[in-house]
Amino acid sequence: MKSKADKSQFSKFLSDNGIWVVLVVLIIAITLVNRNFLTPQNAVALLTGESVKGVLTFGVMMAILSKGIDLSTGSVAALSAIVSAALCQQATATKLWAGLGTMPAIVGILAGIAIGCIVGFANGWMVAYLHLHPFIATLGTQLICRAICKLLTPGPVSKLTPGFRFLGNGRIGPLHMIVLVMIILFCISAFILRETRFGKSVYAVGGNDQAARVAGINVESVLIRVYMWCSVCAALGGILLAGRSDSADPANTGLNYELDAIAAATVGGTSQTGGICRISGVAAGILIMGVINNGMVMMGVNDQMTFIVKGLIIIGAVAFDMRKNRVKA
């Protein structure tokens, strides 16, 4: 009897913490191949390198939880980065908006976040009221936002003010600001999902929107706020990216970041069928994708092979999720 109880407890532990076990095994495996992987310097490089994608993931996670998806986050990040960077560009011969004075960093940041709110509202409105599939609605805004980026400027917007760059490059003591922002977003996301009526409503809408409607939840309002949150996270990620690199490029900023965010959220246990998400699992998913990215670079693996591995991970995570849901049904 004791053996069965032990096995039951072990199975429960694996079910609750399997994603963290996978992370630990992955770290050990890569360290055995390259001992320089598990060093403080590389840990800092990994965290700072994945923080922007982590910020985007906490937004995409909410869309997937509501039984949707957001493919526009990378392009929203780029558009917000370009507008914010242009407002906070130092007065040089290459200044994008030469007739406009250099704005304080807070103005550029708020302008970028405002763009996220506008795009997110548009996405949510199309999903909630036009009843467009989230894939189609956000694919459309992805293309529109990237095109606007290229219309605004043919090349990178660079030479930004030190105040603006601080958010992406600065430190508070030993802690990098870009990592601190990701941690704050994690805490806010956890609070929203666990403690607020809105968070519980997102779970309900993702689980069964008709049942949620019968229970008195304003489904349309919830969806609009979900996609606004998603795009605001994307906008903040774009601002961080511009500050970190001291530039915003219409062609490359945020390119394919939405895929990494979707992968991290899915690997972290956010169900594509909606209504299921553990914020701690999503954090582990972000770290797993970061370990894969960083580890393969350190091992000298071809970039295309990295994409193949990521693709296989996404397919495997979704297949596992579907199988698990069929078993429960």
Image (cartoon, rainbow, N blue to C red):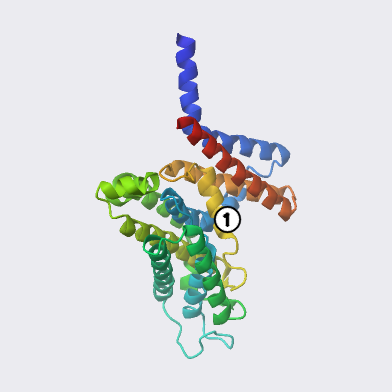
Percent x, y for residue 205?
36, 49
Q: Is residue 23 above or below residue 66?
A: above
Residue lying at 48% horizontally and 64% vertically, measured from the top left: 137
Residue 121 located left or right of residue 153: left
Locate the N terminus by quadrant: top left
Percent x, y for residue 35?
69, 41
Residue 109 located left or right of residue 192: right
Secondary structure category for the residue under label 1: helix
Percent x, y for residue 161?
50, 76
Q: Quadrant of residue 2?
A: top left
Residue 193 located left or right of residue 319: left
**Residue farthest along the top direction in this orientation:** 1
Locate the C terminus by quadrant: top left
Residue position marked by numbered label 1 in the rendering: 259
Would residue 169 be visible to someone looking at this image?
A: no
Q: Is residue 55 above or below residue 286?
A: below
